[in-house]
Image (cartoon, rainbow, N blue to C red):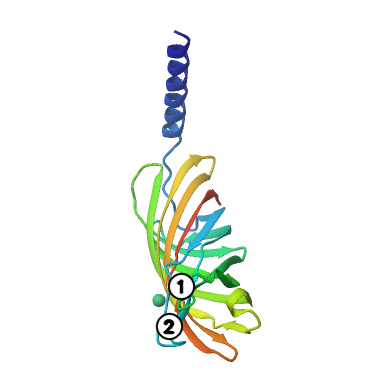
Amino acid sequence: MMMTGTIKGLVAGAVSVVLLLGATAASAYEAGDMVLRAGLAGVLPDSSFDQNDLGGAGVDVDDGYSLGITFTYMATANLGVGVLGAWPFEHDFDGAGTLSGSGEVGSTKHLPPTVTLQWHFPTGTNFHPYIGAGVNYTYFFDEETSGALSGINLELDDSWGLAAEAGVDFDLGNDLVLSGQLWYLDIDTEAKLSGLGNLDVEVDPWVFMVGIGKKF
Ligand code: NI
């Protein structure tokens, strides 16, 4: 009985939360609206390297997480300009190819500012889904080597590439939104390793951010 009462209470609570969310006016975005979001961002590389560059030696790029900040400016009710910014991400490199099994061989930090043109679908509900396409610039800094690459100086070229985006804002009322965003970034860099040569690395990450936003 105790159990049933608790479950009934939980269900009643959940239903009232849903009714409350549903009751907030489903306000579409309008021209001139701005949405600023912040949350947890992850950069999940699907990295590969040119097997010919260093006789089969290469690296795998590990995931990195940071504080993400995104911004949308609505030029019309449906067309927005999106910006992805973040606190710097840090990624470790593991040895790959002939360096497989050698563990961590280096790390880098980077900032991947991205600008997209977004299409916001008119749903007439509290969900504001959108897709976007644009350009990413990635700036690498604080490159370091360790393990099998210890003592070798590493420089990573900056990267320009295309970006694709999908996201959704869920209107919580009071101009607050729950936000989920996903990007695919074409990030390609040349790793310059002193005394060894240059290695072409495709980082090509999926980037996600979950957070909360405010509409202005
Ligand atoms: Ni690529």
**Mark 1 close to ligand 1, CB under 8 Å:** yes
Specify the amino acid type for callout 2: Gly
Within the image, what quadrant is residue 21 found in?
top left
Residue at left offset 41%, top offset 40%? 26
Residue that mark 2 sits on: 56
- Front residue of 195/114: it is 195
Q: Look at 47% across and 87% down and name the residue there.
A: 54
| Lower position in the chain sequence, tag 2 or tag 1 | 2
Say if 10 sits above or below 202 in the image: above
Q: Quadrant of ligand 1?
A: bottom left
Q: Amino acid at mark 1?
A: Val
- Mark 2 vs mark 1, CA separation in Å: 17 Å
Neighbour class for label 1 at 10 Å: few (<14), some, many (≥20)?
many
Tell whether 99 sits left or right of 88. Answer: left
x, y percent for residue 77: 40, 56
> Where is mark 1, residue-wise?
203
Name the element at disc 2.
loop
Q: Position of residue 137 (x, y in %)?
A: 51, 75
The residue mark sitting in front, 2 or 1, is 2
Front residue of this view, candidates 8 and 118: 8
- Residue lying farthest top? 1
